[in-house]
Image (spheres, coloured by chain):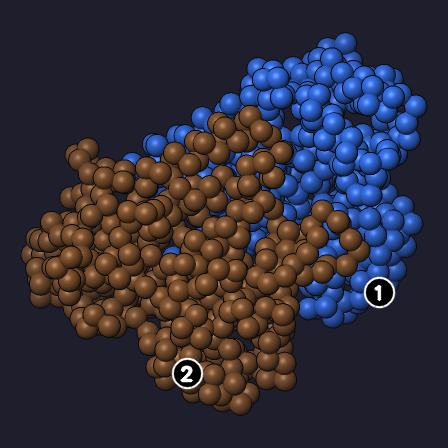
Chain colours: A blue, B brown
Amino acid sequence: MPSSSSPEPGFARDRFVLPRAPDGSDAVYLAGNSLGAQPRAARDALLAAVDDQWARVGVAGWEDCGWWATPRRLGDRVGALVGAAPGQTVVGDSTSVQLFGALVAAGRLRPGRATLLSDAGHFPTDRYLASSVARLTGLRLVTSSPPAMVPDADTAVVAVPAVDFRTGERWDLAAIVERAHAAGAVVVADLSHAVGAMPVALDALGVDLAVGCTYKYLNGGPGAPAFAYVAARHHDALDPPLTGWTGHADPFGMTEAWTPAPGVGRLRVGTPPMLSMLALDGALGVFDDPDAADLADVRAASLALGDAFLAALPAVDVVTPREHDWRGGHVAVRVPDAEGLCAALARRGVVVDARPPDLLRFGFAAPYVTLDDARTAARELSALLG
Amino acid sequence: MPSSSSPEPGFARDRFVLPRAPDGSDAVYLAGNSLGAQPRAARDALLAAVDDQWARVGVAGWEDCGWWATPRRLGDRVGALVGAAPGQTVVGDSTSVQLFGALVAAGRLRPGRATLLSDAGHFPTDRYLASSVARLTGLRLVTSSPPAMVPDADTAVVAVPAVDFRTGERWDLAAIVERAHAAGAVVVADLSHAVGAMPVALDALGVDLAVGCTYKYLNGGPGAPAFAYVAARHHDALDPPLTGWTGHADPFGMTEAWTPAPGVGRLRVGTPPMLSMLALDGALGVFDDPDAADLADVRAASLALGDAFLAALPAVDVVTPREHDWRGGHVAVRVPDAEGLCAALARRGVVVDARPPDLLRFGFAAPYVTLDDARTAARELSALLG
C-alpha cells in the first residue's frame, strides 16, 4: 500500500494530454502498457527540435544542438530509472534490434558454452530473435518458464523479461540472476513492461545486460527508441555484432577497421532517429524533473490502482498475481472474446488491449490514471460481462 | 544539361525552411548530402501526428491512423523514387541496421559460396558491417574499388554504393550488376548518396537488394529512418536475420515460431519510430506531390548547379568527375585543412562539410539550392584560399 505521503494515482495528470473517448471527453486510458499517453513536454521538446534546431541550425545540430550526444545522455537518464549508474545505458534503435545485439554480445562473453536459455513465454520478438541468434552463432536454444530455469555449465546466456507481457506476472530477477551467475551464465533482461512502472535495480541485482522500450510507461511516443544496458564490468570484453559507424571510437575518423567506442557507447549503431529521440527527451521529465515523484511512489500508486480495480472487478478469471511483489504494471483477465470486449470497452470510453488467445490487459500508469479510472474500468467490464 | 522545360535550380525553395547564416539570413546550405533542409510539410505532418494522432487517438493509432501500414506505404513511395515497383521496399531502422539485414539475407541467397566482395572505399558503416557479417556467417570479406571488382564462382554478394560518399563519383551500377550476375552473385547497393539526387532504376538494372537513407536528399530530418529494397524475384527465398515481431506474417497472432510476412514485409523488425517516420511522410511530397518535379529534372538542375560551381571555382583539386554521367549529387575538392576551411565557410554563411583527410564536400540539392548559392560558394572558397 502507498505510504501516507505517497502521491495519489493520477498525480501528474495535468502534464499529459489524454486520448479522447467517443463522446469527446478524456478516455479512461489503461493502455499505457502498450503506448503511453502524451506528455505535454514531449510535444514541446519535439517542436523545439523541429523549429529551433533542424530548421535553423541544420547539419551543425549534430554538435551545436547536442544531437550527437543524445543517445548517451538519454541513456543515462533512462539508466537512472532502472538502477544503472551513468555510463552503462544507451538509447536508440528498436527493442528488437537492441535485443539482437545484446544476445549476440552476451553469447560472446561466454565462449565455449553452447546454450541460450530463454523464457518460453517471452514476448514474441524476444523469442524470434533468440531463435535467429542461436542459428547465427551456433547456440542451442532451450526454453522454459523463468522460475523453472536450471542454468548449467553449458549455459552461456539466460534471457528473461522482468514482467510477463501477457499475464503481468513480475519475475524474481534477483533469484534468476543468482542461479545464472552460480552456473557462470550471463543474464539478458527485457525491461519493456517494467521500466517506468516500478523501480528496477540493475546494478544492485547484478544483471549483465538489459534492453527495454520507452513507449510504454515512459511515454516516449509511438515507436520511441529503445535502450540497452551493459554492466560496466563487461565493457572491456563487449563485442557487439551491429558494428555501425556511430559506435566507433572515432566515428568521424572513418578509419579502415571498426574500433569500439569506450564502454557502452559501442552499442550505438547507425544514425539515431533524432526527432523520436527528442520527443522522448521531453517525456522523461515526468520521471526526473526536480518535482517528479520517485519510482517507489509511482509503483505504490500503480499497485493502489490495481487493488482498486481488482476490488471492484466482477467474478472473472484474473491471471495476474494479486501479491504486490509479483504483480507488474498491468492486470490481465481471461475472458471469452477478448477482442470483442476490448472494442466494446473502447466504445464506452475505456481503452485497454487484448492479447491472444483470451486476455484483456488493463495498464495502470500511475502518473495519469486515477482511482476513478480504475473503478470505472471494472464497472464497465462488469456491465459488459452481464 | 537541363532541357529548356526543366525547372531552375531552387525551384521548390519556398517549400523549405533554410538554416540561418551567422547574420540571420538564409544560409547557402550545401550540406543536403549530409542532412537535408526542412520541408515545411515535414513539420506539418509531424504536428498532425503529435496533436491529432498520438495525443487524441492513443494506441488505436496503430490501426486508426495507419501507423501500422506506414513502413510499407512509405516504402512504396521511396521505392518509386529509385525505380522500384510497389511491394519491394520498406522504410524503418537505420541504414546500418538495414545493411546488416540485407548482407546476411543476400549471403543466404547464395549458399555454398564463401566470398563477400565489398567496395574498399565504402562508407565506414558499410565496411564495418560487412566485416561483422563475414565473421558471423563465415563469409570471406574481399575489398576492391567497384570498377576493379571481379566476382567469380565463389562470390556470394557484391556490396557497392551508387555514389562514393567521399569523392562524389557515381559508379556504373549497370556494369557492376552485369558482372555480378554473370558470376552468379547478388548485388547489395547502398543508395544513400543517390536517392533523391538522381533517378535510380533498381528494377530495370536488376539490382538484387538495396538500402539507403532518407535524411540526405530526401530531407526526412536528422536520423530519419532508412529503407530497404529486395527485388520481387528473391522474396520467397528471403531469409533475414532480424526476425522481429513486426516482420511476422501474423504479428498479433504471437505464435511460437517466426513465420515471415509475405514479400518484403518480412524485413520489418521492431516497432518503428513513428514520429520520425511521419516527418519523412511529409517530406516526401517534395518529390511526389502532383506538382513535384520529376527526378530527371531534379538531376538536371543538380548537374547545372555543379557546373556553375565548377565554372566559378578557383584553381583547386576537384576529385569529383566533371562528366555528368559519373558525377553524383555532390562535388568534393581536396584542400589543405578541410576542417578549418569548413568552419571558415560557415562563418561566411556557406554550409558544407569536411571528410577526412582533406576533402570539402559541396552538396547540390536542387529543390532548394540556387545557381546564386553555387556561385557564392565558389567565390567564398576562392576568397579563403587567397
Viewer-proximal residue among B321 and B181? B181
When asked about the image quadrant of residue A14, the answer is top right
- Element carrying mark 2: helix
Image spot of residue A278 (x, y percent) = 47, 36
Subunit bearing disc 2: B
Q: Residue at x 59, y 55 (%)?
A: B268
Disc 2 marks which amino acid?
Glu
Give, as a three-letter code, the residue at label 1. Asp
Give the crowd class for mark 1: few <14, some 14-19, many >=20 residues within 10 Å. Answer: some
Which quarter of the rendering shows the C terminus of chain B? bottom left
Q: Which mark is residue B178?
A: 2
Seen at 63% across and 72% down, the residue is B237
* Location of residue A195 by image quarter: top right
Q: Nearer the viewer, mark 1 or mark 2?
A: 2
Classify residue B192 as left or right of residue A85.
left
Residue A108 lies, with reference to residue A382, above or below; the image says below
In the rendering, at what x and y percent does residue A347 appear?
Answer: 69, 24
The answer to whether the residue labelled 1 contacts the one labelled 2, judged by CB atoms less than 8 Å apart, is no
Q: Which residue is mark 1?
A: A154
Q: In the rendered view of the protein, which quadrant contains the N terminus of chain B?
A: bottom left
The answer to whether residue A124 is above or below residue B183 is above
Q: Pinpoint residue B264: horizontal percent, then vertical percent.
A: 57, 61
Element carrying mark 1: loop
Residue A116 image position (x, y, % from top left) = 79, 60
Q: Is residue B344 visible?
A: no
Is residue B205 at least partly visible in the picture? yes
In this view, the residue in front, A231 or B55, is: B55
Q: In terms of depth relative to the viewer, which is nearer, B165 or B340?
A: B165
Give me the chain letter of mark 1: A
Q: Which mark is residue A324?
A: none
